[in-house]
Image (cartoon, helix red, strand yellow):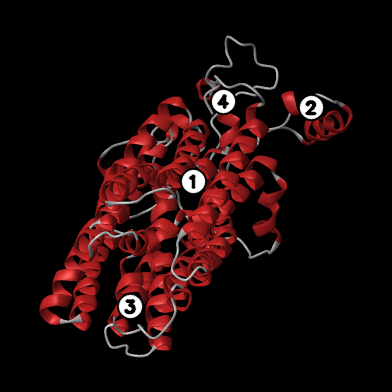
Amino acid sequence: MASSSNSVSSTINEKSSPDRHLTNKEPPETEANVLPDTSDASPDNASDIEKGHAPTKPSFAGIDPSSFPDGGLQAWLVVSGAFCCIGIFQAYYQTHQLKEYSPSTIAWIPSLTTFFMFAGGPIWGKLYDNYGPRYLLLVGTLFHVFGLMMASLAHEYYQFLLAQGVCSPIGASMIFYPAMSSTGTWFFKRRALAFGIMASGSSLGGVILPIMVDHVIAQSGFPWAMRGVAFLLLGLMVYANLTVRSRLSPSPKPWSLIEFVRPLQELPYSLVVLASFFSFFGMFLPFNFVILSAQHDGMSTNLAFYLIPILNAVSIFGRTLPGYIADKLGRFNTMVVTSFLSTILVLALWLPARGNVPYILFSAFYGFSSGAFVSLAPALVAQISDIRQIGIRTGSMFAIVSIAALVGTPIGGALVSDEDGNYLHLQIFCGIMMLAGSFVFVASRLALVGAKPLVKV
């Protein structure tokens, strides 16, 4: 330990030397300190910013890349547990219990579901950073299952809204954030792949649950269909509660409003949030309206029902393969490509689609491209964040974009109502919002490395 005189001398030198950060200060405790500064990088070494030099003196809290297991039994058990944590009802409610309500009014149920799923991010993220995932997962399981059980007893619009639009997604939110944040603590080089595998759980559920619900409704009615879903999720969550854990010990800190706002002062982070905000405006519209628009254009009800399972089935690969590619070629690079691909599919395939084949092709291709966003968005935040603050930083991002998720679907429903059931304006709105998000993702990449298209970032 240095003597007091040396400490005073060091303090004086720090105040007087313009290059003090090169000699006397520890590197910033963010994941950025494992990536080289590319502002003055030569073309030879600028081809892969993640091949930069790891700090010779590893920073604490597991930020040094060599401290991340990037595999092993415990790491993959966490991923498998998170996998268990993660549009069908719009069409069903519109023709059954809530048929007297407009599409825009019914759309508030899935819209509120998405909003509460993400809006609690800062709160759950902070609780995760302070206390770890255990209690959040337990309480979230109770809320999620209870909300679905109450939806099975619902008959009025407000009952569906409270049970399926408020209670159940609050529980799902308390499950989603600790599962995602815990996964990030176990992986560095293969983090996008791990997030992709985790997120593909919701895609697999999106294949199984619509078919399951449809058959159970036909045989036993809507109430038992909802109870069946609730019991299935309860079993999965028992496994998740036993396997999901963080590699890092919790570090309780006082609550402060500024820590929720401070990340927005960082240009790359704020641009990632803005890009995600625009993307969320349009991203979920195909999930909620592709069945109805296909029926409007002549597809049979039985065939149209399978569009969502097709979309979600392909989304399993869309959430895993781009994650693998992103770890190899760069997460920001992959996000830019898949965002523009989703935009093109909406404007060039869904917009002019007439007949069965275009709708089936759109559902398959869009499932792949949109799936990449779900797995890559948290990976982008993790890449530019202190891993010990990943909960609050990902939570803050999703809380902001939840506003877009809240109003996007009702706006789409209103556009359909104003056009007397025509989906043209909804499709144009979806495409424009996703195009804006794609360009802002490009801006976030430029903020990180400048105009260097061959750099891995």
The mark that comes first in sequence, 3 or 4, is 4
Disc marking residue 93: 3
Mark 4–mark 2 distance (CA, rounded to whole Å): 17 Å
Residue 118 is situated, as x and y percent measured from the top left of the image, at 49, 63
Type of amino acid under label 2: Arg
Q: SS at mark 4?
A: loop
Discs 2, 1 touching: Cβ within 8 Å: no
Tell me which residue sits at (42%, 49%) in the image.
Answer: 374
Residue 290 is situated, as x and y percent measured from the top left of the image, at 36, 58
Q: Name the residue under label 2.
A: 20
Disc marking residue 55: 4
Name the residue nearer the viewer: 78 or 408. Answer: 408
* Whether residue 50 is visible: yes
Left or right: 54, with 366 as reference point? right
Disc marking residue 53: none
Image quadrant where residue 35 sits:
top right
Name the residue nearer the viewer: 252 or 443. Answer: 443
Q: Mark 1 points at which residue?
A: 377
Tell me which residue sits at (54%, 57%) in the image.
Answer: 281
Query: Which of pointers 2 and 1 indicates the residue nearer the eye?
Result: 1
Dividing the image into 4 quarters, which one contains the N terminus? top right
Residue 317 against residue 239 in the figure, above or below: above
Type of amino acid under label 1: Ala
The mark that comes first in sequence, 3 or 1, is 3
Discs 2, 3 touching: Cβ within 8 Å: no
